[in-house]
Amino acid sequence: MKRIGTYSIVLFLISILTACGGSSNEDLKEYIKMVKAKPAGKIDELPTYPPYETFIYSSAGIRSPFDRPVDIKQRTIAKANSNVRPDFNRTKEYLESFDISALSMVGVVRWDSKLYALIHDNNGGVTRVLPGNYLGKNYGRIVHIDNNKVELIEIVSDGLDGWVERPRVLTLVEKD
């Protein structure tokens, strides 16, 4: 009994769908003919733009507008009171021939109760270092080694024929 009811509903829906689809599309065909009979429109030419002029930033050596202005008088007093300067008579270590950005900490190893940091250079070598060793081109002296970082102090020029200390940190680089 249920089958007869299902079949009758399906038959009814099919008859409704065929009744709706039987109309012709003559009005649509007429509209397409009318649109195609109209003359084609004119497309405007593309506007001409002036060529791009390159800009050369010539203020690279000037103070950034986002930095505070520097008081030269105070810097001169600080320079006179400062006795920070690199030791030029010391023989340079291997890792001082690399820029600090080319060095990365890749691990630590404990040997003879000392904690060594393993520093990778861009030549593919790995060097172990202790506090007191130097690395980087800015006279960076290692002051502390931890399981995941190396703290060092660089000595950089202050721009007025003097030197200042700047702390840096190399953190452990973990590769996936």
Image (cartoon, grey):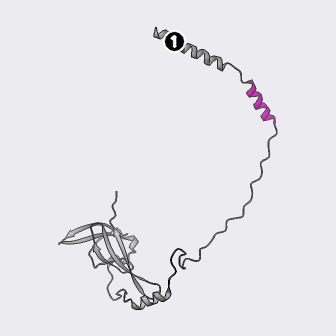
| Residue 52 falls inside the magenta stretch | no
Residue lying farthest to the bottom in this orientation: 80
Look at the image and tell me in which quarter the C terminus lies: bottom left
Query: Is residue 7 toward the left or the right of residue 110 in the image?
Result: right
**Residue visible at 40% across and 83% down in the picture:** 164
Residue 72 locus on image (x, y percent): 50, 87
Count numbered badges in the picture. 1
**Residue visible at 34% across and 64% down in the picture:** 173
Binning the other alpha carbons within 10 Å of mark 1 as few (below 14), some (14 to 19) or many (20 upward) gives: few
Magenta-tinted stretch: 24-43
Residue 47 locus on image (x, y percent): 75, 57
**Residue visible at 55% across and 75% down in the picture:** 65
Q: Quadrant of residue 143?
A: bottom left
* Residue 7 drawn above or below residue 83: above
Residue at the spot of label 1: 7
| Residue 38 falls inside the magenta stretch | yes
Which kind of residue does numbered mark 1 sit on? Tyr
* Local SS, label 1: helix
Query: Is residue 115 toward the left or the right of residue 57 in the image?
Result: left
**Residue visible at 70% across and 64% down in the picture:** 51
Residue lying farthest to the left in this orientation: 112
Assign the magenta stretch its main secondary structure: helix
Q: Quadrant of residue 53?
A: bottom right
Query: Is residue 71 toward the left or the right of residue 33 in the image?
Result: left
